[in-house]
Image (tube, helix red, strand yellow):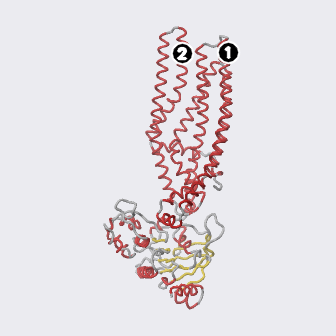
Amino acid sequence: MTGSRDRRPFTLRALWLMVSLSFRADPVGAFLLCLAMPTYYLSPAAGAVATKLLVDAALRGQTAMVVWAAVFAGFAVLAAAGSLKLEVYLSYTIDKKVNALVQRRLAEMLVRLPGVEHYERPDHLDEVQQLRDNAGELGSGLLAALNMFAQVCQVVVVCALLAAQTPLLLLLPLFAVPSFVAAGMSNKLTMNASEESAEPERMAHRIVGMAAQLPVARETRLFGLAEEWRDRHRRLVASADRIQGSAYLRSALLGAAGNLLFAVGYFGAVLLVIGRATSGELSAGDVALTVVLAGQAHGFISGLVDGTKFLAGIFIVASRMDWLTAYERNELRARASDDPHPAPARIAKAIRLEDLSFRYPGTERPVLHDVSLELPSGAVVALVGENGAGKSSLVKLLLGYYAPTSGRILVDETDLATIDVGEWRSQASGAFQDYCRFEFLARESIGMGKVEDIDNEAQVLSAAQRAGADQIVTGLPKGLETQLGADWEGGTDLSGGQWQRIALARSMMRAHPLLLVLDEPTAALDAQAEHELFQSFAEAAADTGDAGGITVLVTHRFSTVTMADVIIVLADGRVEEIGDHGELISRKGLYAELFDLQASAYR
């Protein structure tokens, strides 16, 4: 993933995010976990001390001390077992709640951004996929931090107890240094592997998702693609596994080498203590304590190494969320205006484009070049041109999905960049070729175009009628209360043309928008149906009252735009011609040429 490794510096924001998510998702559970973890991790050291007291008291014949030491040891065991049970339960519940919180926050980050650039950036999509797949790990962020703190406390306590036997035993932790170095190298290896395998993993997920889609299922059967999908998925998964497997193998070898060096130090410590006990410098209890502590030290330091790797892995996921959060914050800041204006209540004169150029982020080729034109108030404007001419890109700019690379868009005399984008869109509406199939109740699928009126049956029916979808609605088993989509119990599926009519009805929920964009929304309809529908839209646009609303039609069918007040012909991202149908035909330019080609094809 391009540049992603450079976005992995240690940040306090990511660390705080990793720990605070548990408190945000489950405050009570997080607090109890903070109490349970220290108890569990300090119990082994307490048990070792109890063992020393028990052995020494037994050898001296101190019965009372033996009883108290045994009680102390038993209490340490019970405390460890009880706190472990509580920790497991709390970790499970916190994990689930944090996962739900992160998934919800991820969805919010995707939909809150004013533009749609992030849906077309591979680096952003890889981050989203990785965070979506690993969101559950963030639920262990608090656990990992507490685990690290407790492991450090354990090591400190164990070192203090070992030093009480002989200061030379403090050299034992030094044998753990190679393990920490190996852990750091392992984290780097696995992190790089995760980054390198992000794109093939995302494509493998996409293939599995495609398999559940009916349009893909039809073409899969028609073209015999089942084996092709299987082989592609296998190759992608194998590629990701090869990258990750190599990293994990090298990581395991590094860890084994570190553990081997620590084992050398451990046996040296045991031999040292046994030698001092033989010479009478230490008691049998001291030997027992040292052997137990040295063994625990190995476990604790190994746990500290594993805990460091665990914490680092969660930190990587947290840093992804931190990066996405920063991306969202920066985008919102970049689109915010220093002198914001509310959306106008009406368009008095026109929407004007001045020297507007645009290229998609991450690309070098402009899709629009120095476009200057005027969309008059109350007019029906048609955008025509061949594929790739820039029609849909211009629509995206008018709706504020992207900001121009240079130039500006003026609504009357107000720069669109200074108008609150949410308010502007609340005054606009539209339907698109790649429309959404909202598989809800028919009333809801249409009513999504104006959520505040989603339960207003009269308003929904009126929108359906204006879009020519009223017969579709009345023909449904339960009318507007029919569940759409064959995947749901009692659901009714629709044809492509019927779904497109529903999408058009959704765009009609806002009766008099300032800007109505119809970007090839009738591709599933025949030419006659499209012509009749656009004719009705043109007539409705002429009756916009005082709002001065502008209707923008985008279509490949030239015969359907003859009723437009203004026809704008785009070619290679530039304005080739402007005029009404009669004017453009008389000029015998590109419009006349394309119109004649289509007309001859129909003839």
Residue 284 picture location, percent across and down:
59, 13
Viewer-closest of 185 and 488: 488
Type of residue at label 2? Leu
Q: Is residue 468 left or right of residue 212?
A: left
Which residue is labeled 2 in the image? 53
| Residue at the limit of the structure toward the bottom, as seen here | 586
Which residue is labeled 1 in the image? 275
Viewer-closest of 447 and 14: 447
- Give SS at disc 2: helix
Q: Is residue 167 left or right of residue 587?
A: right
Residue visible at 55% across and 20% down in the picture: 49
Q: Is residue 103 above or below residue 408?
A: above
Residue 15 disc label: none
Count residues near mark 2 (Cα–Cα under 10 Å), then give few for <14, some for 14-19, many for 20+.
many
Q: Is residue 138 above or below residue 440?
A: above
Residue visible at 43% across and 39% down in the picture: 28
Q: Can you see residue 169?
A: yes
Count residues near mark 1 (Cα–Cα under 10 Å), then give few for <14, some for 14-19, many for 20+.
some
Residue 30 picture location, percent across and down:
47, 39
Q: Is residue 540 left or right of residue 241?
A: left
